[in-house]
Image: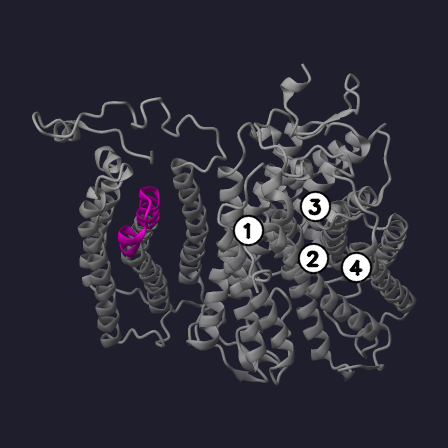
Amino acid sequence: MGRIFTTDHRALGVLYLYLALAAVAVGTVLSLLMRVHRVWPNAVIPFFGVMKPEDYLALVTMHGTLMIFFVLTTAPQSGFANLVLPEQIGARGMAFPRINAAAFWLTAVAFLVLISAAHITSGGAPISGWTSYPPLSALPAAGPGQGLGMDLWLVSIGVFCIAAWLSAANMLATILGERRAGMTWTRLPMTVWAWLVASILTLLAFAVLLAAVVLLFSDRHFGSSFFIPMGDMINGRVVGHGDGSPLLWLHLFWFFGHPEVYIAVLPGMGLATSLFANFTRRRVAGYRMMAGMLVAIGLLGLAVWGHHMFVSGMNPYAGTAFAMVTMAIAVPSTVEVIGWLATLWGGGLRLQTPMLFALGFLSFFIAGGLTGPLLAQPALDAYLHNTFFVVAHFHLIMAMAGVFSVFAGIYYWFPLITGRMMNETLGKLHFWISLIAAYGTFLPMHFAGLAGEPRHYDRLMGPATSFPSLIPVERGITFSALLLATAQLLFLWNVFSSAHRGRRAEANPWQATTLEWAGGAERGRIERGPYEYELPLSGNGFHPQWETASKEE
Amino acid sequence: MPATFTRNQVEIERKDPGIGGKPPVDRRPTGGGGDGDNWDNHPRGRGGPRELLIRYRLGVLFALAGDLMFFVALVSAFFVRQSTGHFDIHDNFINDWRPLAVPPILWLNTAVLLLSGLTMETARRQLFHEIDVMEEWLGLGRPAVKRAAPWLVATLSLGLMFLAGQWVAWEQLVREGYAFISPDPSSHFFYLITGIHGLHLLLGILALAGALVGLFTLKKVEFRQVAVDSVAWYWHTMGLFWIFLFVLLVFFQ
């Protein structure tokens, strides 16, 4: 019991990772069901039989919700930050360990409520997507799963918002108030900068989502009409009562939804920066610039939500403004990429598994990022918005980049948690299969999208639309996705076998400079920067942050 | 030595009574053991009383920053909903927003809440008076607790009065035909905004009761300071939020 209801931040970090693992396992299975259904629409699928269109929409909803909230928000931010953040800033622990633990348990409750939405209720899971646009989400009669299933979805997300809010407040109080003497802003590891910015975004964004959820719940149960438009019809019957605005939900939701993307990917950017420095044994190129650009991305990310709404009937002038700000994000993102490339350029790369996954992150960040400015054009988005092009874009930039950064983090911090190294050969195999299969899955989706293949449609061979030439592409995507999922078994095997039988790790196996590797021995003042590699005068070529400067003079 | 205010003229007089009083303590600014060891000069990460206070203040600050965004979202929804509508068959723009005249008792409630802010601040300051904190720190008595407790009780009662007043306002509205289930968006917003603010205040009252209990049960002076200080900042923020929400509900219908 004491081990489970712990307030130890590192144990909580591991619990968050387990929760994310459970969510990613369910989410992946759901996505595979979708892929199989798309190419063999009449196949009999376990639990479903022959899949109905609403089943497909329920899969889309649950896959999106699980992956966005319970994987990409929990693992890189709450999971990794709990693992190492207090050590990295030289704190004794989190500022509010009990609030931190409460945040985890609320997240776990939210997860269980969400899962129960799919299994307990008669209508099944909600079908209105992870974005839950009203009026579909506002009226129980709108479809199967929109009754109790949708209510449970709202409760789950509401609880998740409160958990995220507690967790972020704790994280910010820790970073601002608990740093050890001498741990100045410019001595913070880049991961801490990323968690700082992501926590600020969490605090601001999830509060707005919670407000939206409360309003939607009130629409569903208390007869208000914040989001339900006048004359809304279901099955030919008018159900709308009042001049509500679905667009209002879109504004509130995407004010949360866009920063959410950065909450998912910023920690990966910070981690990649750290790993590039470590595995090339060089200082981070332009540390201040890199940290500043992380902050800039976060701030700009708060002002671009409208680019998700170009085709929603929003004022076109607003669309132009949002397009400008969105394209402005390309500037700090490019600075980050150039900073990474400058760190890597001419450095002696040590291609160990964490580094490979960090490079994979970089690759996806560029590949997925390049389509961002395209989709930021309202004119292009009008065509591409409801196609698989968008699916390809966000799966590369957010899902794959995010997941690869999580893998990088797990391979990197595994020795810190277990005292053992993960198997390198299996790790490299896992990396290469995952990389190729991930591109094999998501790259062709660009072409399917350009060809006009719509997303959110359960099958291609309907009487109205047919894309017979796309069937081979679709089939290839499905096979690739199956391969991608199978490769993760290698990873699971590697984690659980290495935890018991892996090679024993030495104290600082990656010869890292940041404080989590100090082993808690030193508690002095911090006198060094976070990435003091590449020092020709000293013997071992790097100065960890726990070394005092005076020792060398 | 826990955090204190630098003493003011009145305190110097109180502290220096002439004959038979306590000896003057005139190490500035915050007293201590006479060796300058007042925790101000300690490196961070040592868990001193001042650091404890800063930690809780940061936590309350960030939690309330998120809360502020929550209310900002509600207020923006208020303005958006106010202007949405539809076109009828004659192409007239129809909007269903009927401005709501807030019950006049809200003015009284607002005054009560502002007053409770003053009593709360008075209570908070009692716990930081240097001479009282010194006495508690040295274990000579609990003057700060004795001075703060009545003010906390006053705040608690005023808070309960505010909530009761809000309840009366709701009942008056229902009698006027503005129940929550009426189709009026303005009344939906009124109930939601006052309801959620009231819920926050209810949490504040529970915290206040907790702080009052803590005032007598917490062993260390710095813990008592933290308890009252955190509740005080929360309370002030809710007062500030209410002023904005009140202005919104009264003048922006």
Across and down, in percent, residue A152 comes to 55, 74
For residue B18, side relative to residue B182 (left or right): left
Mark 2: amino acid: Ala
Across and down, in percent, residue A350 comes to 86, 36
Q: CA distance from mark 3 to mark 1?
A: 15 Å
CB within 8 Å, label 4 to label 2: no
* Residue topped by disc 3: A268
Q: Which residues are magenta?
A: B212-233
> Which of the 4 image quarters holds residue A391?
bottom right
Mark 1: amino acid: Thr
The C terminus of chain A: image quadrant: top right
Residue at 61 percent across and 64 percent down: it is A131
Q: Is tag 3's residue or tag 4's residue first in the polypeptide sequence?
A: 3
* Residue topped by disc 2: A382
Q: Is tag 2's residue or tag 3's residue first in the polypeptide sequence?
A: 3
Whether labels 4 and 2 share one chain: yes
Q: Which of labels 4 and 2 is toward the front? A: 4
For residue A263, side relative to residue A47 (left or right): left
Mark 4 secondary-structure assignment: helix
Image mark for residue A202: 1
Image mark for residue A496: 4
> Disc 4 sits on a residue from what chain?
A
Estimate how packed mark 4 is, as few (under 14), some (14 to 19) or many (20 or more) residues with alpha carbons within 10 Å: few
Whether labels 2 and 1 share one chain: yes
Q: Which of labels 2 and 1 is toward the front? A: 1
Mark 4: amino acid: Phe
Mark 3: amino acid: Gly
Residue A439 to residue A45: above or below? above
Q: Is residue A504 magenta?
A: no
Nearer to me, B87 or B65: B65
